[in-house]
Image (cartoon, rainbow, N blue to C red):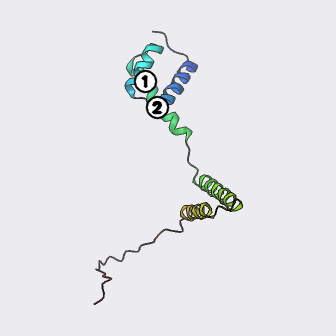
């Protein structure tokens, strides 16, 4: 069997990554690949492994940027809702902004002591 060029391998890995994104099973990928590329199961498993790495590398988290982008999008939506006098939507968006910014977080401190607290009057 002739060895595939680097370009061909890259194309195949890209195709396999698209199949993974579309939730194709390993068996479906093997069936497609063996019919179209005339490669064995071991080679297809290598393509699948490289495709998974490719998918992971394409999605790099940048928390600060993603957070700022989300807040700006909500602010834009909020302003649009206010401009359209849709106050119910504006209120909902405001809650989402507050939630995103962590304003609804409850901080719990543990002292190590466990006590039963009852709201029932004596």
Q: CA distance from mark 2 to mark 1?
A: 8 Å
Q: Report the residue at 42% width, 73% height from top.
A: 108
Q: Is residue 77 above or below residue 3?
A: below
Farthest bottom residue?
122
Q: Secondary structure at mark 2?
A: helix
Q: Tell me which corner region of the image, top left, top right, bottom left or bottom right, holds residue 88.
A: bottom right
Q: Is residue 47 left or right of residue 6?
A: left
Q: Position of residue 103 (x, y in %)?
A: 54, 68
Q: Is residue 121 above or below residue 96?
A: below
Q: Residues within 10 Å of mark 1 (few under 14, many from 20)?
A: many
Q: What residue does disc 2 label? A: 20
Instruction: Say which mark, if any, is on residue 3.
Output: none
Q: Quadrant of the N terminus?
A: top left
Q: Position of residue 54 (x, y in %)?
A: 52, 34
Farthest top residue?
1
Q: What residue does disc 1 label? A: 29
Q: Position of residue 111 (x, y in %)?
A: 36, 77
Q: Quadrant of the C terminus?
A: bottom left
Q: Is residue 105 above or below residue 14?
A: below
Asked if disc 2 and disc 1 are in contact, CB closer than 8 Å, the reply is: yes
* Of pointers 2 and 1, the one earlier in the residue sequence: 2
Q: Report the residue at 39% width, 29% height from top.
A: 25
Farthest front residue?
85
Q: Report the residue at 49% width, 35% height from top.
A: 53
Q: Position of residue 60 (x, y in %)?
A: 56, 44
């Amino acid at each position: 069997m002739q060895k595939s060029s680097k370009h061909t391998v890259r194309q195949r890995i890209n195709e396999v990554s698209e199949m993974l994104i579309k939730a194709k099973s390993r068996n479906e990928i093997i069936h497609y690949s063996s019919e179209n590329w005339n490669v064995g199961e071991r080679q297809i498993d290598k393509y699948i492994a490289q495709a998974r790495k490719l998918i992971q590398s394409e999605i790099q988290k940048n928390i600060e940027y993603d957070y700022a982008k989300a807040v700006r999008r909500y602010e834009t939506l909020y302003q649009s809702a206010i401009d359209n006098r849709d106050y119910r939507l504006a209120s909902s968006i405001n809650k989402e902004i507050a939630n995103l910014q962590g304003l609804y977080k409850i901080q719990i401190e543990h002292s190590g002591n466990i006590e039963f607290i009852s709201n029932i009057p004596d």
